[in-house]
Image (cartoon, grey):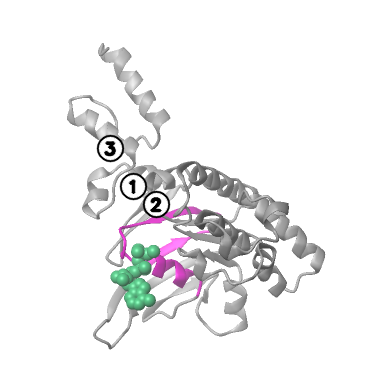
Amino acid sequence: MHIRVEDLTHIYARGTPAERVALRGVNLEIGPGERVGISGPTGSGKSTLVQHIAGLLVPAAGQVLLDGVPAHRRTPEARARRRQVGLAFQFPETQIFEVTVFREVAFGPRHLGLGADEIAARVRWALEMVGLDHDSFAERVPFALSGGEMRRVAIAGILALKPQVLILDEPTAGLDPRGRKELLARLRGWQAQTGATLILVSHHLDEMAGLVDRAVLLADGQVVADGPTRHILSDGARLRAVGLSPPPAVALLEALRAAGWPVRTDALNIEEVVAEIAQHVTTDGHG
Ligand SMILES: Nc1ncnc2c1ncn2[C@@H]1O[C@H](COP(=O)(O)OP(=O)(O)O)[C@@H](O)[C@H]1O
Ligand SMILES: [Mg+2]
């Protein structure tokens, strides 16, 4: 699926005292199979943007084209495109409404008109994909789950639709550090297996670093940077200027640089930091 966001503007509560311009002329193109991260401070318009890509909101100006078709139209061809875009909302409890985990994950496939065997197979597959054991979770009540489990169920419900585009809005909120890592690794595996487009919204830049090749920064409803993940995430000054914290690896190398070490600052994880420091320990005679 080819996604093209054209001069997209979104205004909430238009014409009321609470009017709020959430997106101001956003342009963005995402090709099939791309892995893209969208970051930016709270209120920068990330959630609004991805809801437009999923065709759930109507633009005040501009449009989102899914394979050339305006995403929000009420036509069968727009509906068919929207069906290929799965969005896991920032707040999963707003997405969950069935009485058992099985029914919740089966909801989408059932509406695709699939047979019972195929539905059951998809539910099992999707739950395993997000790290929930089918037999221990299938009959549980979604609302009695922990926040992290609920989020996994919501994501499973989207995966079960086998979308061409998967959008995850802050998917690791409510998960502990190990749970975050594990879920992201599973989603990376899913993406590699399916070749689907993956759009990850997060303000945890280190989390984004391991999962996407391209990073887009939003600030105040506008795209302020768009490029290779390493390039965007290693520019600590720009990240701080829009109110984001650089990944810890970048912050550490920047501090070393400020202390006089001639290190590069474009490392994205601990292993790269260690390699960079080791190079200077041996060649510069430190330590
Ligand atoms: N339903 C809404 N009604 C009014 N204003 C909203 C609504 N949703 C979001 N906003 C406002 O729009 C702006 C962008 O919000 P959002 O897209 O949720 O940003 P982000 O996901 O980056 O935190 C914010 O100023 C937010 O307060
Ligand atoms: Mg948001």
Outermost residue toward the left?
259
Q: Position of residue 60 (x, y in %)?
A: 36, 81
Q: Which of the marked residues, 1 or 2, is nearer the chain's N terminus?
A: 2
Q: Is residue 103 left or right of residue 151?
A: right
Q: Which residue sits at x=59%, y=72%?
A: 97
Q: Is residue 30 magenta?
A: yes
Kind of residue sitting beneath label 1: Ile
Magenta residues span 27-55
The label shown at residue 251 is 3
Reply above or below: 274 against 33: above
Judging by the rendered image, the residue that carries numbered circle 1 is 232
Q: Which of the marked residues, 3 or 2, is nearer the chain's N terminus?
A: 2
Q: Which residue sits at x=30%, y=67%?
A: 221
User: Could you say which quadrant of the image residue 52 lies in?
Assistant: bottom left
Q: Is residue 73 left or right of residue 103?
A: left
Split into quadrants, the picture shows ligand 1 in the one at bottom left
Which of the two residues, 55 or 139, is positioned nearer the viewer here?
A: 139
Q: Is residue 54 magenta?
A: yes
Please tell me whether mark 1 or mark 3 is closer to you in this view.
Answer: 3
Kind of residue sitting beneath label 2: Ala
Mark 1 touches mark 2? (CB < 8 Å): yes
Judging by the rendered image, the residue that carries numbered circle 2 is 215
Q: Which of the marked residues, 1 or 3, is nearer the chain's N terminus?
A: 1
Q: Is residue 267 left or right of residue 35?
A: left
Q: Is residue 241 visible?
A: yes
Mark 3 touches mark 2? (CB < 8 Å): no
The Cα atoms of the two marked residues, 3 and 2, are separated by 18 Å
Q: Is residue 9 visible?
A: no
Helix, strand or loop for disc 3: helix
The Cα atoms of the two marked residues, 1 and 2, are separated by 6 Å
The label shown at residue 245 is none
